Amino acid sequence: MPTLNWIGKEAVVKHHKEVPFRLLEPVPELSCGPADAGNLIVQGDNLHALKALLPRYAGQVKCIYIDPPYNTGNEGWVYNDNVNSPEIRKWLGEVVGKEGETLDRHDRWLSMMYPRLVLLKQFLREDGAIFVSIDDNEVATLRLLMDEIFGAKNFVATVLWQKIFSPKNSARHLSEDHDYIVVYALNAEKWKPNLLPRTEGADARYKDTGDPKGPWTSSDLTARNYYSLGTYSVISPSGRVIDGPPSGRYWTISKESFETLDKEGRIWWGEKGNNMPRLKRYLSDVKEGIVPQTMWFYKDVGHTQEAKKELLELVDFATSDDVFITPKPTRLIQRILQIATDKDSIVLDSFAGSGTTGHAVLKQNVEDGGIRRFIQVEMLPEVASTITAGLY
């Protein structure tokens, strides 16, 4: 399996073990809501915060979502990690280099991420999963890093989120319309995503034709995958003999199963009874929900402008420059919660920023009667007290 190597890796691979356990101290004047609600916002470096939280929450978190720095080369680097290596201390203490200084920049990012991901893994339940937002700057290295820490066999999917709704005319080359959400399970054999609620659009595909079994739609009965029992001929109600499926394709069911379905009226031959047969699928037979897909469109989960609007409605920023560069819409995080949590799950976000994860948890609880709890960690005191925690 391919592995990553970078200058300073040896210094950070076991660094999480050297981070001391600390006692978390509550701050009553910054707290709000009932004390027994179980929600927690921690201000401090997330490496130290995670180590402090680990004794209580190890193996209890169903869903982790993080939105780490995208490492574009243009932003200030605030995650200064005191690793016992002169070069790492130097790199992680400096401002991110210019775009051309990619080697230093990627080394610093990997050194920051590695020990934090190792700790985050220890929080997950056996049926838990982690979702990581990222863009093209680090998606390739993130995949290799996650493979090394979580195991390649536990990779679930890479989701594409359509983050903008119109092309960027200022783009140097192509307009970058999407971000990624990389998904890994602690144990892919045991992690099962929830089905998403059916939408009116999904149900609209099923037409009511007066069939006593209810609304239905038709689906193809052929596939390209070889099937040893899928090359028989059929006779349509009009008497037309169909020698078999189109060239290079196979019926997806055996002749015996086909004849049974035909007798039950579940084969659609077209209005005149002489078309290529299709399977009738009834709305009453479909699953209670929709299998999650890897393409998430802005109309379904929101976009960056929606996220900024949500944030501006809650926080009075001094200037537009103070608004978070890459905020996430609440609907995006809710989609993750719908897929990856039960109604009583613990959700962890160690790069909390504006606190969208916490808002999404509370909103999802209202919508489905859940009692999910969140743990959010934010490093910057001014952000943690005025934005992350200040919005509740």
Image: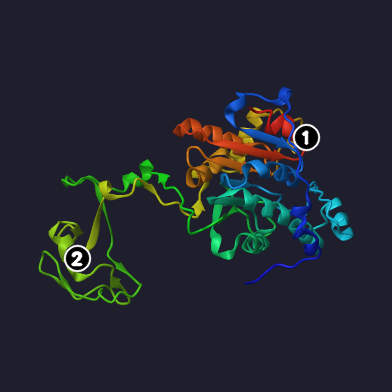
Question: Image point 63% across, 53% down: which residue?
Answer: 121
Percent position of residue 282, x then y:
25, 50
The amino acid type of the residue labelled 1 equals Pro
In this rendering, which labeled residue sits more in front, label 1 or label 2? 1
Q: Dot 1, crowdedness within 10 Å: few (<14), some or many (≥20)?
A: some
Residue 127's place in the image compared with 42, above or below, is below
Rendered image quadrant of residue 323: top right
Would you place residue 5 above or below residue 331 in this image? Answer: below
Kindly indicate the quadrant of the structure image that contains residue 271. Answer: bottom left
Question: Which residue is denoted by mark 2 in the rendering?
Answer: 258
Q: Secondary structure at mark 2?
A: helix
Q: Residues within 10 Å of mark 2 (few under 14, many from 20)?
A: some
Asked if residue 72 shows in the view, the reply is no
Q: Residue at x 53, y 45 (%)?
A: 336
Q: Nearer the viewer, residue 222 or 55?
A: 55
Q: How many marks?
A: 2
Residue position marked by numbered label 1 in the rendering: 381
Q: Is residue 119 left or right of residue 230?
A: right
Q: Amino acid at mark 2?
A: Phe
Dot 1: what SS?
helix
Q: Is residue 229 visible?
A: yes
